[in-house]
Each structure stands twice: as structure tokens, then as C-alpha cells.
Image (cartoon, rainbow, N blue to C red):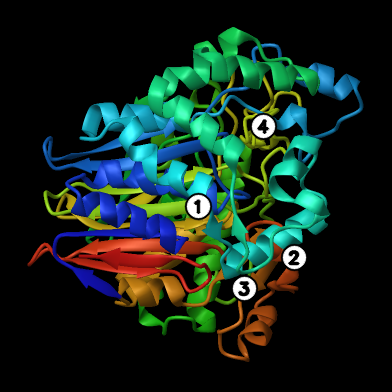
Amino acid sequence: MVLALNGAVCTSQPLASQAGLAALRAGANAIDAAVVAAAVQGVVEPHNTGIGGDCFALCWSAREDRLFALNGSGRAPVAASADALRAAGHSELPPQGIHTITVPGAVGAWGALLERFGSWSLGDALAPAIELAEQGFVVSEVIGGEWDLVTRFGFLQNDAARRCFAPGGEAPSLGRIVRFPDLANSLRLLAKGGPREFYEGDLASRILRALGEEGGRFSPSDFADAHPDWVEPIGLDYRGYRLCEIPPNTQGITALIALGVLQHLDVGSFECGSPESVHLLIETVKLAFADRNARVSDPEYMEMSVESLLDAEVLRRLAEKVEPGRAARDVIARPPTGSDTVYLAAADREGNVVSFINSLYGPFGSGLVAGDTGIVMQNRGRGFSLEPGHPNVLVGGKRPFHTLCPAMLLENGRPRVSFGVMGGDVQAQGHVQVVSNLVDHGLNVQEALDAPRFHYLGGSDVALEAGFATDLPDRLAALGHEIADPLRALARGGFGGGQAIAVDPGTGAFWAGSDRRKDGAAVGY
């Protein structure tokens, strides 16, 4: 762990962590630092995040002494239609392309966070990202490997994307210096004009024109009417702590359902990573995913309320379905294809704590860059269903189901651990595993992040990460689990990657950890 007294920042890329820490040292607060770091990540980790994506944030405000939640996800264009896509021969949303693009919500969310809780302007917060985009940065190991892989698999869908991210037809290799002048120009426009430049200004017009040339059905009002929403965090008590998540349309409720079931099971009596412990975790995640896939969508379209899904008696009855000696096979849970993203945490000496996530969804999102803006457009529309009558069916102006879910663990009503696990479908089940590591097994934040994970894939299928005991696959198979090739997990976020900052309740010091699976760093001062 990295221990610090005055402030801490954790991200999946060291340059982003350092930029956030530099902001704290220059007098910014944790909210400012989070936006600084997120903007930098959009430059140095361009296949996973950027201003063409969405974001969500949980913010503990020291001034107001309470937790706030911001939904920064965008909506489908009003002209979007499930009927039209089905008529064109689609049975589900394609993985990439123009039909998967929703209005990006990140820029609006950054502006809302800074306006309500920040001390810096958006222009100040974007300055480090602009500098890196203009002057260049060095491609790091994990990011470089992923960049090369997704480029070779054809995730860059238009000429503008290939020109930006694979000049000459190849991704930049490890150690190469990369510059993004088009993106730098777009960031400068935002720094000068603020968030509305993205949604109503010249930059918005250029984005809309580019999307129209790709066959998109966005109107100026789709962008002009976009806005983030302050929402009430949802939470569930678990063995003396309270896990807080953002409500639907995110999958955060999945982690709460799983923990609500797990609290009725004596998982802490087994060794961390043992067959008995892992079996119970898989079974609770399996039940939670069944609810997630059937019920979670834009809350305006959900048939069951959050309160109903988290009802104590409902969770107790679900726990009765878990058999310690047998894997359930009658649970139908089909997670949609997921991908990777970026998560970051920040905390400052005044007591502000932020849990923040920003994403394009799939590698390079839709695969489309909007003209000469350098902006990769997300493919969050992939989260919609085309199944008639499904709560998450595509409707114009609707928000899609979202995998993004930052988390915060409270103790005695105050922040104890700000954390997240990035990686598509692995996010909510990663939360369950990290919380169990922390609470049930007493691991510190670095140990809790680094511990090997399983990735539940749907049905009876589960992939196991290297690092578990060698007999674990056979022991779980004997219980009825189908042990899948770990390569199957790669298309759905692998085994995730996380960041965490724990606040020492006695001293107020920060205990920070950064997942070994990423290039990232925990830093503090």
C-alpha cells in the first residue's frame, strides 16, 4: 500500500495519478483532482476512456458531510428505434458502429462535479491533459499491449480512428512517444467554452456533422438537451459496513443483491480463496446477475423498484437457494458482452473522497472517431436489448443499461474505502469479491485488490484467474461448476483491475492500493 496523510490519488495509469496528485499539491481538492486524472486518462489510455464516453461518480463532500451520486450517462438519440434495427436484420445491437453510439455524458458530468464541489475551472482541470496530448506521452506496458491487440482485431472502424490511433496500420508500440493534436484542439475548445461547447457549440456541430456522415440519426437537440443527473446513492449494510453504489441504470445494484444474499452465509468461516468460500461467492453473484439481466435498465422503464430488489425478506429467500455443496444450474443469467474501462479514486486532507469511473465501453468504443476532433465515440448503446417488451429495450431518448459502477464502503456512516473494479461484466462481481476480502477476511486494500478473482460468465460457467490453489478448478467442478477457459473472460473485461483508497478512522490517513493487473499507481503525499 501507499500511505499518506494529506491526499491520495489512484488510477490505472501513473501519469494520470501523478497529474491528480500534482493538482492536490497545488491546492485543488479531491473532486478537482479526479477530473484532472480522468482527462489525462482519456489521452494516455485512449482505447478505454475519453470525452466521447460516460462517467459516474460517488462524492463524499466534507462541506456537506454526506455522500452524493452523479449519473453522467448519455441517452440514445430520440430518432433511435428498436423496430428499425430489427427490420434491418439485427437481432441484437451490433458490437460497434454508428447504431451503438449514445450521447456522451462525461463532459457534462465533469462540469457538474466542478461546479458543485470543485475549486478549479474546467480549463484548469484540462490543462495537464492538453499538455500531454500536444507534447506527447510514452506508451506504457499493459495499455500498449491492449492497444496493439484491439487494433489487430479491427476495432478501429473508420479512417479518422485509424489515422489517430494506428497510423501506418499499426498501434504504437511500448515506449513510443504518441501525440494527439486533434484531441488537444478539442480539449482547448472545452477549456475555453466549458461543457456547453461539447453539447451546443462549434465542437458539437462538428461532432454531429461527422456522425451524420456515418449514417447517424442524432439531432442538435439530442446533444443540447443532454445533462447529468444528481441521484440518491443506494446502499446495503454488510457486517458492520455499508456498501454504497449508484442506482440504475448502472449495475451497482447487482453487487448489493449479491452481498445481501452473502450476509446470510458464513463465508468468513472459510479461508479466503478456498473452494467453500469461492463457491458461495459464485452462487450469490449468479443469483444477482439473474436479477440484473432481467430487471435493470433506465429507472423510468424498470418494472421493479430498487427497494423491492433489495428487500430484506427477498434477499433472505434468495439465500435459501444457495446450497453449500452444489452449484445451481437452474439460474438463467446471460451477461452481455462487456469490456474494459478506467476507474480512479481520490481523497484530500479536508475529508473529500471521490469514487469515479469513466469509459468508452468497448475497446475504442464504437470504433468511430468524430471527424477531425480526435474524439472516440462510445458504444454504450450496446447495453440496450432489441427484445420486445424487455425493460432494457432500445427506445429513443432512453439511457442504456450500464456496467459502470463506482463504489464506496462506509463505516459508522463515514467513508472507509473508496474503490472500484473496472472491466465490463466483472465490475459488480469484482465489488463483491473485494468487499468480502476486506470485511470477511481482513485483507488490506492492496491485498484485497491483488487477490485472484473468478469471473462468472453466465449459466454454470465461471473462469478462474491464475493464483488460486491448483486444486480449486477440480474442487469447484466437483460441486457442479463448469470451469471455463480464462481466455473466454478476456472479451468481457478479463478479471478486472481496481483502485482503492481506505481512510484510517483513527488518524485520517490514507491507505491506497493499485491493482497489479494494470499499469496504474497509487500515489499520495
Along the viewing direction, whichever of 68 and 525 lies nearer the viewer: 525
The circle drawn on residue 381 is: 4
Quadrant occupied by the N terminus: bottom left
Q: On the image, which quarter does residue 457 sit in?
A: bottom right
How far apart are the alpha carbons under marks 3 and 4?
37 Å
How far apart are the alpha carbons under marks 1 and 4?
18 Å
Pick whichever of labels 3 and 4 is earlier in the sequence: 3
How far apart are the alpha carbons under marks 2 and 4?
23 Å
In the image: residue 488, left or right of residue 142:
right
**Type of the residue with mark 4:** Gly
Pick whichever of labels 1 and 4 is earlier in the sequence: 1
Label 1 neighbourhood size at 10 Å, few (<14), some (14-19), many (20+)?
Answer: many
Pick whichever of labels 3 and 1 is earlier in the sequence: 3
Label 4 neighbourhood size at 10 Å, few (<14), some (14-19), many (20+)?
Answer: many
Which residue lies under the disc numbered 1?
A: 342
Query: Disc 1 on helix, strand or loop?
Result: strand
* Mark 3 or 1: the one toward you: 1
Which residue lies under the disc numbered 3?
A: 326
* Mark 3 or 4: the one toward you: 4
* Residue 249 place in picture, x, y as percent: 51, 33
* Residue 471 place in picture, x, y as percent: 63, 91
Q: Residue furthest left?
A: 506
In the image: residue 269, left or right of residue 204:
left
Pick whichever of labels 1 and 2 is earlier in the sequence: 1
How far apart are the alpha carbons under marks 2 and 3?
23 Å
Label 3 neighbourhood size at 10 Å, few (<14), some (14-19), many (20+)?
Answer: some
**Type of the residue with mark 3:** Arg
